[in-house]
Image: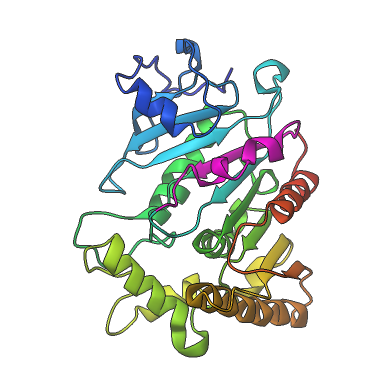
Amino acid sequence: MTAQHPTRRNLLKSAGGLTAAMALGAGGILSAASPAAAAGDGFGLHIVNHNEDDRRMWYYRFQTSAIGWNPAVNVLLPDDYHTSGRRYPVLYLLHGGGLDQDFITFDRHGIREMTAGRPLIVVMPDGGHTGWYSNPVSSNVGPRNWETFHMSQLIPWIDANFRTYAEYNGRAVSGFSMGGFGALKYAAKYYGHFASVSAHSGPASLRREGGIVAHWANLSSAAVDLGGGTIYGVPLWDEARVNADNPVQRIESYRNKRIFLVAGTSPDPINWADVANEGHVLRGQQEFKSLLQNAGIPFDGREVGGGHVIRPDLLQTDIDGVVAHLRKA
């Protein structure tokens, strides 16, 4: 059912079956998994738990030297994956920051229904509660190298174990909030990987307004994920790293890509966090869009009512745009 790979092996049924089933998110179905469908180790990833029982949503948890705990990924397959024999384009969908955000986030928001009948594989990995899709300058709790995990390990593992197009026109990246930043960062920094990039309420500027996003990345990661370590360094930033990660400083790296941007214009006035988050997102995306426009790079930018939330209608619009833009299954 999946592309053959030299490291493929038949996995023993995990003793953590209940955990694996729960990791599928809403709608998981328990049945006997087919050993022939089991994905294999490779690219620095060792599978420690898995569930391939649901026909569409397959779950894997890995041991990797890039991360000091075992991160997971949900892989959502097209309805006809097991019968068509076709290869499919892939959307990497990145979750936001927060203690309740992880690889199951988009399953909670109806990703199965949004992709029903669409010829697209959707990969939804862990990115840390405050991982910022980065390799941090410092960590006091062991490795938290999310950029390495995603770009050097997970993407080649997906291409080796599923029927994908392992090419520029076969991949898109999108995300919400912190994940929107991650999508913009990855698309520019790894230009040849993604033909489409989308940011749903994702910040596009690390340096504006005194560098508030970079400072927030440092503060939130130090408090939650890195035991006092930071993404960009304190008291002085690693300036080369900020420059490399900052979307508004990488404008030419977005040329010849589909670009889809969403920002809210009316955050909840009595919710200071909503005002701070989406207000900055809006201004940063406006700066980003102005730079794109001046460079003659087309984009689809939506400024809509509401605050710092996932908008299912615009996520659906984004998914349909990804399908239309990428190489056809």
When the figure is inspected, residue 115 is found, relative to residue 40, above or below; the finding is: below
Q: Position of residue 170 (x, y in %)?
A: 68, 43
Q: Nearer the viewer, residue 206 or 255?
A: 206
When the figure is inspected, residue 261 is found, relative to residue 174, above or below; the finding is: below
Q: On the rendered structure, is 262 left or right of 235?
A: right
Q: Residue at x 35, y 36 (%)?
A: 62
| Residue 120, image quadrant | top right
Q: Nearer the viewer, residue 214 or 192?
A: 214
Q: Residue at x 77, y 50 (%)?
A: 321
Q: Residue at x 25, y 67 (%)?
A: 138
Q: Residue at x 64, y 35 (%)?
A: 112
Q: How is the image coloured?
A: rainbow
Q: Position of residue 297 (x, y in %)?
A: 76, 72
Q: On the rendered structure, is 130 left or right of 108?
A: left
Q: Position of residue 76 (x, y in %)?
A: 59, 33
Q: On the rendered structure, is 263 left or right of 130?
A: right
User: Which residue is farthest bottom?
Assistant: 210
